[in-house]
């Protein structure tokens, strides 16, 4: 534990020192943690020794995904979903299931996995992560509708893919262990907890008897999240749907709580993300990368360059997006943090094909992180209008409008 903490602290400090450079270049802090975990893990230096069945791996994966889903939900309250649903609705309603099915078909026909395992891989790899396309999402010269589309889609698809992961994982564990009634109760209880607890907490603060002081305001949403986590674990409700529902509920009914927690919450989520990436990298060894064979690597490539592009092309027919915007959406479906944690959940599930599924998921995520996090800034520059407009254009337009205006 102390070795892992030292390694994480050292890599985190290095990431902070390089963060400004990473913002301007193809360098990625996410890729840095992934590569650091790989180098420090048992496969190379052996400094960080972890096994898939370690309690630390499962606990970190659970906490990290809970935190990320909570903050994701807080970014997409009902107001945002209603006002920006037209394009994200296509990506989520059509693009996500099509991506899942096409990816599953590749795993089945190319690698030879059974349909349940293939659908499980499709569900694990369906979510996207804007972190690995930060230069594109954060560039104000990129059309707002495109940035909004990628943000809303990535914020919601983690939660939408989760029930499919749980269902296919339950089926893969053996039909004799599958109880759809219990599974439905677990999912429904998670949503109920995620709605009721935040709503009651927000309504309590809005009464005349309670009021959070300014220094404590950021802790309000944190306390709500911790309570949802504790009640979810005590009642065996699904923690991840509870987290996502809680985030949406806070965003919908507690605008002040949402705003005060936003920066603080993003920092917490980022820390958990980076820690999980370090652990994920430590579980990837040269032996694992070699064991998937050429079919596994071909699957990983096709999952990135065919599955989502085809799904997005079909989903956005007659949508009004330009060819360049559709190409950006099709390419920037990075397999990010949710896929990492879903992969860790599969690895620790004990199903017969857990190792094989994890290996395919792992190589796909590794390729995605390296490719998407290093091409986002390149694609973003393609939307830089100043690069497409002659330097004299603005001067000529101003002179026509006002002959007395000074030139720059």
Image (cartoon, rainbow, N blue to C red):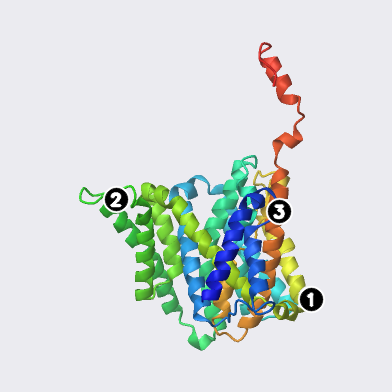
| Residue for badge 3 | 26
Which numbered disc covers residue 294? Answer: 1
| Element class at badge 3 | loop
Residue 87 seen? no
In percent of width and height, residue 91 lies at 60, 55
Look at discs 1 and 3 and give the one toward the viewer.
3
Q: Which mark is residue 343?
A: none
62 or 13, nearer to the observer: 13
The residue sitting at the left extreme is 209
Taking the image as shown, residue 82 lies to the left or right of residue 388, namely left
The residue at which mark 2 appears reads as 212
Q: How much space separates mark 1 and mark 2, taking CA atoms?
A: 58 Å
Q: Where does the image place residue 348, in percent across and percent down from the top left?
A: 55, 81
Image quadrant holding the C terminus, namely top right
Position above or below: 320 against 158:
above
Query: Marks 1/3: CA distance?
Result: 27 Å
Residue that lies at the very extreme toward the bottom in this rendered image: 176
**Which residue reaches farthest top?**
404
Of 82 and 15, the residue lying toward us = 15
């Amino acid at each position: 534990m102390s070795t892992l903490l030292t390694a994480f602290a050292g890599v985190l400090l290095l990431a902070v020192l390089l963060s400004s450079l990473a913002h301007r270049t193809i360098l990625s802090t996410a890729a840095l943690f992934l590569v650091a975990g790989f180098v420090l893990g048992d496969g190379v230096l052996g400094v960080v020794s972890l096994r898939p069945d370690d309690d630390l791996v499962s606990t970190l994966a659970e906490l990290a995904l809970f935190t990320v889903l909570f903050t994701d939900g807080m970014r997409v309250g009902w107001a945002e979903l209603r006002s920006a649903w037209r394009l994200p609705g296509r990506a989520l309603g059509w693009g996500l299931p099509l991506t899942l099915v096409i990816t599953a078909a590749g795993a089945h026909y190319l690698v030879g996995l059974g349909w349940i395992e293939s659908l499980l891989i499709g569900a694990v790899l369906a979510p996207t992560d804007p972190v690995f396309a930060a230069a594109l999402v954060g560039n104000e010269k990129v059309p707002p509708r495109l940035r909004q589309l990628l943000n809303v889609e990535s914020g919601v698809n983690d939660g939408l893919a989760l029930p499919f992961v749980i269902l296919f994982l339950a089926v893969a564990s053996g039909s004799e262990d599958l109880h759809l009634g219990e599974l439905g109760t677990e999912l429904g209880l998670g949503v109920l907890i995620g709605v009721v607890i935040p709503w009651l907490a927000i309504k309590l603060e809005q009464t005349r008897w309670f009021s959070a002081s300014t220094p404590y305001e950021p802790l309000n949403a944190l306390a709500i999240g911790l309570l949802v986590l504790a009640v979810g674990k005590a009642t065996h409700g699904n923690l991840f749907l509870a987290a996502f529902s809680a985030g949406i509920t806070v965003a919908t009914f507690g605008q002040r709580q949402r705003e005060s927690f936003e920066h603080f919450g993003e920092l917490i989520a980022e820390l958990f993300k980076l820690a999980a990436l370090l652990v994920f990298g430590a579980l990837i060894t040269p032996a694992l990368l070699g064991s998937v064979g050429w079919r596994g690597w071909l699957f990983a490539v096709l999952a990135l360059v065919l599955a989502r592009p085809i799904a997005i092309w079909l989903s956005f027919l007659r949508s009004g997006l330009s060819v360049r915007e559709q190409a950006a959406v099709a390419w920037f479906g990075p397999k990010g943090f949710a896929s990492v944690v879903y992969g860790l959940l599969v690895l620790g599930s004990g199903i017969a094909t857990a190792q094989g599924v994890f290996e395919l998921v792992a190589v796909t995520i590794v390729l995605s992180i390296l490719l998407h996090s290093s091409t986002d800034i390149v694609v973003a520059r393609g939307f830089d209008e100043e690069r497409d407009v002659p330097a004299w254009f603005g001067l000529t337009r101003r002179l026509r409008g006002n002959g007395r205006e000074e030139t720059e």
